[in-house]
Image: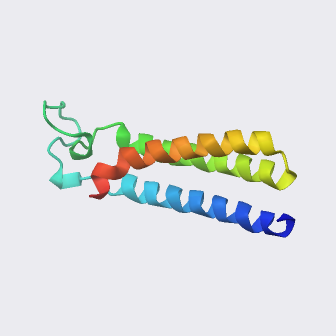
Amino acid sequence: MRGKRPVLALLGVSVAVCQLVVAVLIAGGKCGEDCKVVLGQPIRPGVQWWQDENAWQWGGQMWLAAANLAVVIAAAGFYLRGREREWRITTAAAAVLFALWAAAVQPVTL
């Protein structure tokens, strides 16, 4: 298993980098002219965040992905050093961050 450690660590970091790239693409693809609430207008009831160009979630989902990348890099470091307890904790934190990000962007990607 020792020889597979660098490959598995690199795989985990690569997945987190891909997640961040997707988050940047989503943040860059705001609704624009298709928005029900464009920049500078107040939020109206019944409008979902992905229909509002002012919504904090456009940047927030990107910060969740960036935080996940940082945690995955830390988890990979712990994994490569054989520090199992820290690796398990950071991996669990990364899974939670990924789940939060996926729940946040799910309506946008439908």
Which quarter shows the N terminus? Answer: bottom right
Relative to 20, is 3 on the left or the right?
Answer: right
The image quarter containing residue 39 is top left
* Residue 110 vs residue 38, the one in the foreground: 110
Q: Return the x and y of residue 61 as percentages of the image width and height.
A: 43, 44
Rendered view: 93 above or below 44: below
Expressed as whole percent of the image width and height from the top left, the position of residue 92 reads: 62, 42
96 vs 41, left or right, is: right
Q: How is this picture coloured?
A: rainbow
Report the residue at 36% width, 40% height from top: 57
Across and down, in percent, residue 97 comes to 53, 42
Q: Residue, x 58% and y 57% (percent of image)? A: 16
- Quadrant of residue 4 in the image? bottom right
Quadrant for the C terminus, please. bottom left
Q: Quadrant of residue 34?
A: bottom left
User: Is 57 rendered above or below residue 10?
Assistant: above
Residue found at the very far front of the displayed protein = 1
Above-or-below relation of 44 to 53: above
In the drawing, does residue 58 fall left or right of residue 3? left
Q: Picture coordinates of residue 11 (x, y %)? A: 66, 65
Count numbered badges in the picture: 0
Of 52 and 46, the residue lying toward us: 46
